Image: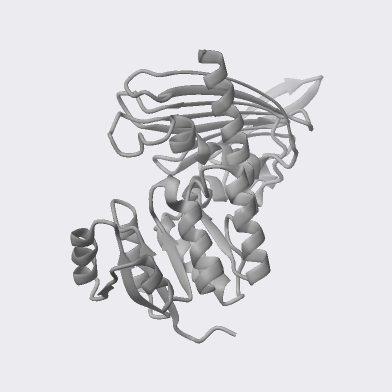
Amino acid sequence: MQSEITKAGVIGVGHLGQHHAKHYNLRNDVTLVGVYDTNSNRAKEIARQYNTEFFDTPQALMKVCDGVSIVTPTESHYNVAKMAIEDFNCHVFIEKPITKTTGQADDLIKSAKIKNRLIQVGHIERLNPALTVFKQYNLNPKFIEIQRLAPYTARGTDVPVVLDLMIHDIDILLSLVESDVKSIHASGVSIITNSVDIANARIRFNNGTVSSITSSRVAKDKVRKIKLFQENLYATIDLLLEQTEIYTITEDPSLIPDVLKTEPFIQNNESKHIAYQKPNLKKYDMLGLEIKNFIASIRGKEKPIVNGIEARNALDVVIKINNMILEDLK
């Protein structure tokens, strides 16, 4: 049984890690016991900002924590998480991707099971209100098109665009399609970095669902859009603007809540309507909700929004896509 106040720490307080510290500090049911970063000046700065302790080593921080956020470069995720779980019995919240390889992910999952610790992974887009609105729909998509484009920045270029950006959409895709992947076809190019900067993947599932995903970090504007098609339903999802539009084919539009307009038409000599909805979405801080879920999961009150196994499966697909692209570029 966990105590009423959960002791949390943050390992890596750069661009994203600082926000983990902020959200722990905001919670009345959490004590932010400290932070660690390889840049000690940065760690001291964040510690002062949130009135907490700076630790010289991650081990010293883990020793006094119930759970830790691991917000370090991908290369170090495995070693840091392994140490936290096995040596200090900590629950871990790892920012995506879970690890660099699926073998590492499998080993962490095994260790967490043995030690009865939880792994939560920060695939934050799962919480996007433009996406969570579909919990009330019976989804069985036949085709999904996803675009994620971003202007070039130096941050995140330590990994290919597939691991940096596309992994968000692979995780979303696997959560939407309840079927195993049947086949993958992928291609990509390097434009600015020595790694793959633009990638496209076409994924077919055993249930017949097909998806086309494009990711680029060489674009003028940010784009994060999903188009979803299934029998009698078409939806456009803008993850950036947090807006969703849904078109449903129905015989009786009065059965669909909050319809803004309808368009009648004839199909197979039957009168039908296209019902248009634009749900009024409640916006919230998605990272704050992830942190809340992590704390509740530590206490056994909830389950991680994205657990280690789900994150491992997304990583497996992403690695296969990246390897296919690299082989194609030879």
The one of 253 and 105 positioned closer to us in this rendering: 105
User: Looking at the image, is 41 positioned above or below residue 320?
Assistant: below
Give the x, y percent position of residue 149. Answer: 40, 29
Residue at the spot 42% in from the left edge and 35% down from the top edge: 159
Give the x, y percent position of residue 10. Answer: 37, 65
Residue at the spot 43% in from the left edge and 24% down from the top edge: 196
Q: Quadrant of residue 239?
A: top left
Q: Quadrant of residue 35?
A: bottom left
Give the x, y percent position of residue 278. Answer: 51, 41
Residue at the spot 81% in from the left edge and 20% down from the top edge: 269
Asked whether, in this view, residue 175 is left or right of residue 282, the answer is right
The one of 23 and 48 positioned closer to us in this rendering: 48
Give the x, y percent position of residue 326. Answer: 52, 21
Q: Residue furthest right?
A: 269
The one of 63 and 218 positioned closer to us in this rendering: 63
User: Looking at the image, is 231 positioned above or below residue 116?
Assistant: above
Residue at the spot 43% in from the left edge and 44% down from the top edge: 242
Task: Judge whether residue 291 can be spotted in this image.
Answer: yes
Colour scheme in the image? one colour
